[in-house]
Amino acid sequence: MKILIATDAWRPQVNGVVRTYERLAEEAAQLDVELTFLTPAEFQTWPCPTYPEIRLALPGYAYIIERMKLIRPDAVHIATEGPLGWMTRSHCIRRGVPFTTSFHTRFPDYLSRRFGIPESWIWSILRRFHNAGAGIMVATPSLATELDSRGFDRIMPWTRGVDTHVFRPRNVRRFGEGPVFLYVGRVAVEKNIEAFLRTDLPGKKVVVGSGPQFAELRVKYPDVTFTGKQIGEDLAECYASADVFVMPSQTETFGIVLLEAMASGLPVAAYPVTGPLDLVRQAETGFLSEDLAAAAKAAMSLDRDIIRKRALDYSWEAAARLFIANIETALFARLGQGTPKRRVTLARPASSA
């Protein structure tokens, strides 16, 4: 089976969406499924307003048509609701090509916080976008319940995995002696980072990541360590050097960073919202509370070996198998056809250079 994935989120961005599809590509190759990607790397791009680190592509419709003819995919999956996603959706609808989508980002929350746009407007647009597809993949049961209540159709579960070889307990203290409270992710207003930075906690606070609030917060909180973007082994060492992982965001759909932290043996402190509610076992792998400081302090007492063990339940192979099964169920059931023979070649994602 050959699957085309259209995504507006791609390298050099570093976020959960990009990491998800990079790992999906690797695992699909082992399952004899060919993936190819349509990304902003193929087009001229412009910086996203208020968030220049994100580059937006404005693809021509003719180019989408030619790419489809060249690739001849058996299935199309649209990962994001940006310009590439909308253009690919339009092509599929015009040509009668069934497609699936994913819900990765809570744009109603983000756009409301950044620009004051009513959330109901954005939910209406997203509902229209996704309900045209053969199925929408979501990462957690709580998100599935919410989307169902908002009128989204044909919801399918698709969890994520974590590389437990990279993210593991290590005997390192990159930030010195603790306790060290760590945040990893975009440094942006929608991540609610200041709820963490304002808390009264012992020891040190560390923020790993970049984003539009980076310069502002680094000046505002001089006692906090801001590392900037970290990847690979450097990122893994940041996790392993901390004592508690703090997630102040209330706008997550999953939170791969939660799994990375737990795989590193880190207890989690977070609000009781989508993402943490689905992944964190209260008083076992972390604490969820409206009082973030209390949750962070309580988390220090948890058994790191147990936390690591729970993270081992999440594999990227299982996530890839579920993704492919969703494709087969949604698309080929709608077409009334059998599943096409799987190919063994993997078309690597386009370079961002």
Image (cartoon, rainbow, N blue to C red):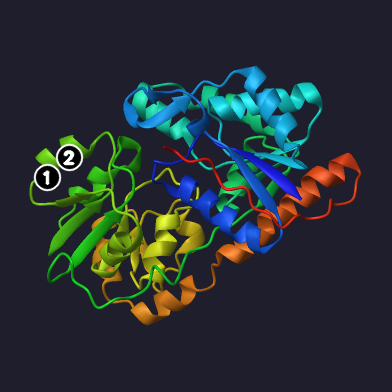
Residue 148 x, y percent position in the rendering: 66, 42
**Tag 1, which secondary structure?**
loop
Disc 1 crowd rating (10 Å Cα; few below 14, some 14-19, many 20+) is some
Residue 108's spot in the image, x, y percent? 48, 31
Q: Quadrant of residue 325?
A: bottom right
Q: Quadrant of the C terminus?
A: top left
Q: Front-most of 88 and 224?
A: 88
Name the foreground residue: 231 vs 101: 231
- Mark 2 and mark 1 in contact (Cβ < 8 Å)? yes
Q: Is residue 208 visible?
A: yes
Identity, as a three-letter code, of the amino acid under mark 2 = Leu
Q: Amino acid at mark 1?
A: Tyr
The count of marks equals 2
Report crowding for label 2: few under 14, some 14 to 19, many 20 or more residues within 10 A (C-alpha): some
Left or right of 94? Residue 122 is left
Between 245 and 293, the one lying in front of the other is 245
Vertical placement of residue 174 versus 113, above or below: below
Report the residue marked by disc 2. Answer: 217
Quickly name the residue at label 1: 221
The reply to whether residue 140 is visible in this rendering is no
Residue lying at 65% horizontally and 48% vertically, measured from the top left = 35
The answer to whether residue 300 is left or right of residue 29 is left
Q: In the picture provided, is 123 more to the left or to the right than 249?
A: right
Query: Which label is found at residue 53?
Result: none
Residue 247 on image: x %, y %: 34, 54
Give the residue displayed 32% in from the left and 25% down from the top: 50
Residue name at image x 47 percent, y 46 percent: 18
Q: Indicate the secondary structure of the residue bearing disc 2.
A: helix
* Residue at the extreme left of the image, as rendered: 222
Residue shown at 86%/46% (left/top)? Answer: 333
Tell me residue 289's x, y (percent). 35, 58
